[in-house]
Image: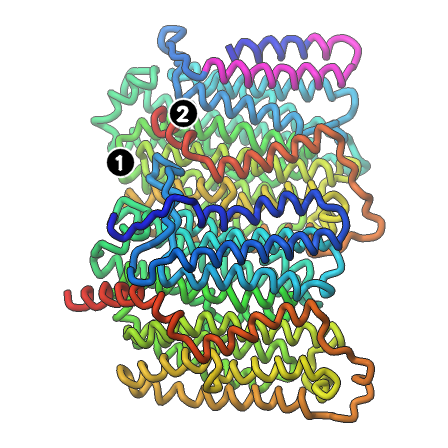
Amino acid sequence: MPDLFNNIGFPWLSVLIFSPLVALTVLLLLPGARAQRWWTLFFTTGEFAVSLLLYPQFNPQTAAYQFVEQHAWIAPWKIHYTVGVDGISLWLVLLTTLVMPLCVLASWTYIQTRLKEFLAALLLMETAMLGVFCALDFVLFFVFWEAMLIPMALIIGVWGGPRRIYAALKFFVYTMAGSVFLLVAIIALFLQAGTFHIPDLMGREYPMNVQFWVFLAFFISFAIKVPMFPFHTWLPAAHVEAPTAGSVLLASILLKMGGYGFVRLSLPITPQAAQLFAPAIQWLSVIAIIYGGLAALAQTDMKKLVAYSSVAHMGFVTLGIFTFTSGGLEGAMLQMINHGITTGALFICVGLLYERLHTREMNAAAGVGKFMPVFITAFGVFALSSMAFPGTNSFIGEFLVLASTFASVPMVAVAAVPGVIIAAAYLLRLLQRLAWGGTCNPDHAGIKDLSWHEIAALLPLFMLVFWLGLKPGSFVEAMRPSLLNLLQQVQSAAKL
Amino acid sequence: MPELLLLTGALALFFVTLGERRSLLARRVALGTALATIAACVLALPAESILFDGAYRVDGFSQILKLFLALGLFLALLTAGGLRDIPADFRPEFYLFTVLGGFGLVTLVSCVDVLTLVVALQMASFPLYLLVPLRREREGQRAQMESAAKYIMFGIAANGIMLFGLSYLYGLTGATALPALMHKLRPVAESPLALAGLALTCCGLFYKLAVFPFHFWTPDVYQGSSNESAAIIASLPKLGAVAVLARLTALASPDNPRFALLLAVLAAASMFYGNLAALVQTDLKRLLGFSGIAHAGYTVVGLVALDRDGRAAALYYLFAYLFMTLACFTVVCRVSYEGRNVAMSELAGLHRRSPLLAWTLLAGVFGLAGVPPLAGFIGKLALLKAALAQGWLWLLVLAVLNSAIAVYYYLLLIREAFFRDATPEAPVLELDAATRWLCWLLVVLILALGLFPGRIIALLGMVV
């Protein structure tokens, strides 16, 4: 499909993907924790700035892949190094580069041991995550997809909480088990189509029995990553035990990969099977929304609460994707970005409270708002955003998803709505405790408000909450052609 | 050339063993021989000729295997390091037997006549049998003797079965040269006699590769022999075995479903047995032994396809396996306290005691688990692709399930090395320069085979 390719010459994406490895080499040579911290912060901020340069050069009028690069890699098997972004992946690339410096800031004082290795793991993660969102060759995609596992498992297992080893093993085993099915699907598609090139694979029609099995294999892999009910059990353990930066990476980027996989691969490659399974997946999403909400409501550990709320929020994403409407897809994509911003911010907030109080129990933190006005303001905004308060970013995403679901499958939408109310309940309860609960707690007397690096970590997210909430148009417009193109593919397959 | 060099090296080592017991000299001679052989293999890569009345063929296939065998020999010798677990008296012999075994393997891959094949297989086997009992004796422990007996007895039995199978094939075709045998066997390849002949012939090689049900020596021999010997037994002979298996399976015509089914069943049984048994191991070498059985199963998955791609995949996988196993054994040899066997718990806190060793272990273990971008991933991809292309969906699903099972016990090793703290009495591990180089080399090789496999895959695709 040459018309879907738009190469502008300079290898922007390769620079973005591989420069963290160069930074990693420099990092390994740097002595002293201070230099290492500053270098990583400097580099990741620079990387974000470079990634922002993509935006003005990106043509939002077309569904074409842009900034495409293609080189032979494993020639005998027709595996190429092909990267490119479209309206769907561009935002996820930007989200990734945005989150990285915030992760460095969130670990500024949190990580005291083996700092160099921790920062190295973060940089490795950046390469792998950007690679996943840019890869247009299936093997390349899989390589990046799996390459994330090792640094992430190390981040959880080495710098995590008391049950970190259990959580790291569980995370690794679950995702690896899912990935092997993805590998089978990749090979099966190659044998059908004779190529690993993802845009080529999308342009073909496959017999229903092939679609059926390939979709199932995709589904297992992506559903574990999202994670969808009932594949979610690794998530609370991983989130709770991971250090703050790990939780942020998990929530903001890694979970998005499941949704991205559905949008990028499942829908266009196996459209008929996707429609066959859609009702079941819609109901699973509803279960995730309700179950995640109720589970969050039952938590007293703040990190667990946010982790379970992720299950619910990601339920909206899968619900939106499988409504097969433009509104649903746009809502799901926005919700992915919103969840990345909001939940990432909430994890940073919980992390910095933990640094001060050495506990994540909600009751122990009751009333800290009195001593930390800046913190509680930010936290309040993020909590309101998380419950999809109008004017904040999550509102528009959830609204689009629910409205589209109402239009296409009203029963499912009706069943999902209580999820919104439950979210309001657990988040308001948390906000109420932190802001006004236990006002006479003497332990909190010496507690300090946010430091410069904590403010720096939260401020960009704070601004994005309102920017996306009040002016989502610019985001939606850039992704619309790609999503419409995708929808067209699915709908034309349905008519066959 | 490589053969002559190895033979010269072996002779030189023989003289070293005769004189004063100078193990350092023996080590240098052995390493020098291996290095020179690598250079010779590189130079001889494009060589093609047929020697000894058509019984010995030098072609692309044999030359690329020789290169990897020579590289493997060099790395295995480095992995063995200072031979801490082998009595000083026997150290020169260790090098002699290893180089002799290497010579046997290098000749094995060039043999295209049944008779030379059998002779070369013996040449490759006997020196390795002798490596097993070379271990420092400990009070109340004679495990090495028991292991050696097991290895030799089963080895000889497997050889006998192989000869028996070859006699069937000879009886059917009247030919001993493999190309003639292949040609004459084709019309009758489906007959029970031919199948039995082929299957029995493969037994000898399955034994070397440790495919179920010819596997039972593996964990015991690994456990009983010294760490250094185990490193060699676990790596090099398997490559030789797969090379000959690739030549032999080319004998079976591509549409020989019964033979393919037989291989498929063996592959599935090996994978399940190896992986399930490995789950409960605590001795590191035993664990690697069982994982070796599982990997033999994966390798056979490639051979099941009975086509060019499948054979190339099996060989590629074994190249990767060679480096990944040596990486694991390097860790075993260095962590081992006075040459004793290493329990999994002794890896605790390895990342602090020696970060380089811990990262080498990580590369080896995740490579074996098939995590990209390491070599094992591309190897597995090649195997699965070849099997699925021939319609072996059920086998592919079983292989995938097994990969998922295997991840668990590999992770246990990583858990010990990276996530657990060392016990206070565990010593800090000081690595000598050679070991540091070896570690870097292995990690780079594992990464390079995973990231840039194109050339080798293209080469293998042409020559198998």
In this rendering, position of residue A355 left or right of residue B242: right
**Amino acid type of the residue that numbered disc 2 sits on in the rendered structure:** Phe
Was residue B38 drawn as part of the magenta stretch in this picture?
A: yes
In this rendering, position of residue B263 left or right of residue B414: left
Residue A479 against residue B291 in the figure, above or below: below
Q: Alpha carbon of mark 1 to alpha carbon of mark 2: how far?
A: 21 Å
Report the front residue among A392 and B347: A392
Which disc, if any, is residue B164?
A: 2
Callout 1–callout 2 Cβ contact below 8 Å: no
Please state, as top left, top right, bottom left or bottom right, where the C terminus of chain A lies in the image. bottom left
Residue A56 against residue B395 in the figure, above or below: below
Quarter of the view holding residue A25:
top right
Q: Which residue is tagged 1?
A: B256
Provide the chain ID for the residue under circle 1.
B
Was residue B24 drawn as part of the magenta stretch in this picture?
A: yes
Which disc, if any, is residue B142?
A: none
- Label 1 residue SS: loop
Residue range of the region highlighted in magenta in the rendering:
B15-44
Provide the chain ID for the residue under circle 2.
B
In this rendering, position of residue B143 left or right of residue B138: left
Which residue in the rendered view is the most extreme toward the left?
A496
Quarter of the view holding residue A26:
top right
Report the front residue among B186 and B62: B62
Q: Position of residue A494 (x, y in %)?
A: 19, 68
- Label 2 residue SS: helix
Say which label, 1 or 2, has the lower sequence index. 2
Report the front residue among A36 and B460: A36
| 1 and 2 marks on the same chain | yes
Residue at figure coordinates x 41%, y 74% from the top left: A317
Residue at figure coordinates x 23%, y 54% from the top left: A203
Q: Nearer the viewer, mark 1 or mark 2?
A: 1
Which residue in the rendered view is the most extreme toward the front?
A56
